[in-house]
Image: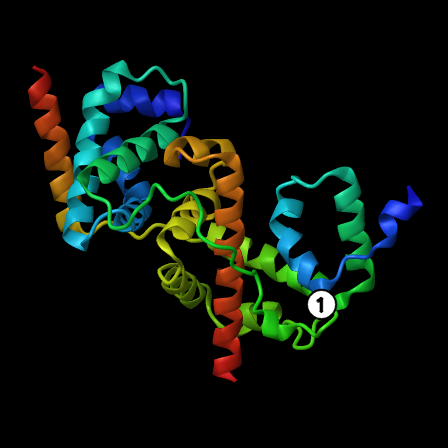
Amino acid sequence: MEADGELLLRLRSGDERAFVSLVECYQEQMLRLATSFVPSQAVAEEVVQDTWLALLRGLDGFEGRSSLKTWLFRILVNQARTTGTREDRSFPVPDPEPAVDPARFDAAGGWADPPEHWIEAAEGRLEAGKLADRILALMDELPARQREVVILRDVEEMSSEEVCSVLAISDGNQRVLLHRGRSRLRQLFEDGFRGAR
Amino acid sequence: MRLLLRRDLVCQQAVELVTDYLEDALSRRARRRFEAHLAGCPHCTEYLAQMREIIRLTGRLQPEDLTPRQRDEFVELYRRWRSEQE
């Protein structure tokens, strides 16, 4: 995506193509993120639509204290939160959840069933598009709060500070959710390779 | 100092430190302990490489193109906003 300054100028001056390419860039992950807050896909689509309109209406007042992207996702999360919560989100972070199934370690805490090798196989066996589809499907299996953090940090590549500001969570919670989300994603990915053999 | 390092990390603890390690959120002492464990443990080294690979693969996802219909809808939305302004 181009620099915010130039993009803002184009958006404010009536450049339809600038708006469409902005939408193209973020629509898919915005929808995925919204889905974790609201009860249905249809509601999520409405939330995203409302977010785009709110962005346009806010353009004149936007002072650039955060990046345009952080601002966009903050609007989205606020819209989604006021639209409806699917679960009790006030609870900080649920019970401890190990990164790896404890059954895979021996009594001393060493690996009894060590990680499979799959890095080269993943690249070799699956074309890039299929690999992306698999990652997306597995991301949808993550618990909502872990998925939110993984989308913002690892797909959208925001900094931890930006993610904390978008989701209004503490840095500690952000890191715990990221850890669990990534760990679970790794496990699901490995399971796929074990099953495929 | 040596005494503090004596109690070695086990694998089950090491996998819980991976994110803090990648986020640079470990104390210097904890970081040294983690790296000392990796140096002697090929499985945890593999595990760390896989976590990095997962992050890399996730970061490589590309947004799908909008359908022509969606494109029209968004152009329409934009025009509606423009007309609101006048």
Give the image location of residue A9, x and y in percent. 30, 19
In the drawing, does residue A126 fall left or right of residue A118?
A: left
Question: Could one spot residue A2 in this view of the protein?
Answer: yes
Give the image location of residue B1, x and y in percent. 91, 41
Between A46 and B58, the residue placed more toward the observer is A46
What subunit carries mark 1?
A
**Residue A10 vertical placement versus B31 (above, below):** above
Tell me the amino acid under the disc marked 1: Gly
Identified at 25% across, 20% down, the residue is: A59
Q: Secondary structure at mark 1?
A: loop
Check the picture and name the quadrant holding the N terminus of chain A. Answer: top left
Give the image location of residue B22, x and y in percent. 64, 46
Q: Quadrant of residue B26?
A: top right
Question: Could one spot residue A15 in this view of the protein?
Answer: no
Identified at 50% across, 68% down, the residue is: A189
Identified at 24% across, 28% down, the residue is: A55
Q: Give the residue pinned by disc 1.
A: A109
Q: What is the total number of numbered labels drawn onto the structure image?
A: 1
**Residue A195 vertical placement versus A65 (above, below):** below
Identity of the residue furthest to the right in this view: B2
By what rule are the colours in the image chosen?
Answer: rainbow
Between A161 and B12, the residue placed more toward the observer is B12
Give the image location of residue A124, x and y in percent. 55, 72
Identified at 44% across, 36% down, the residue is: A163
Between A112 and A32, the residue placed more toward the observer is A112
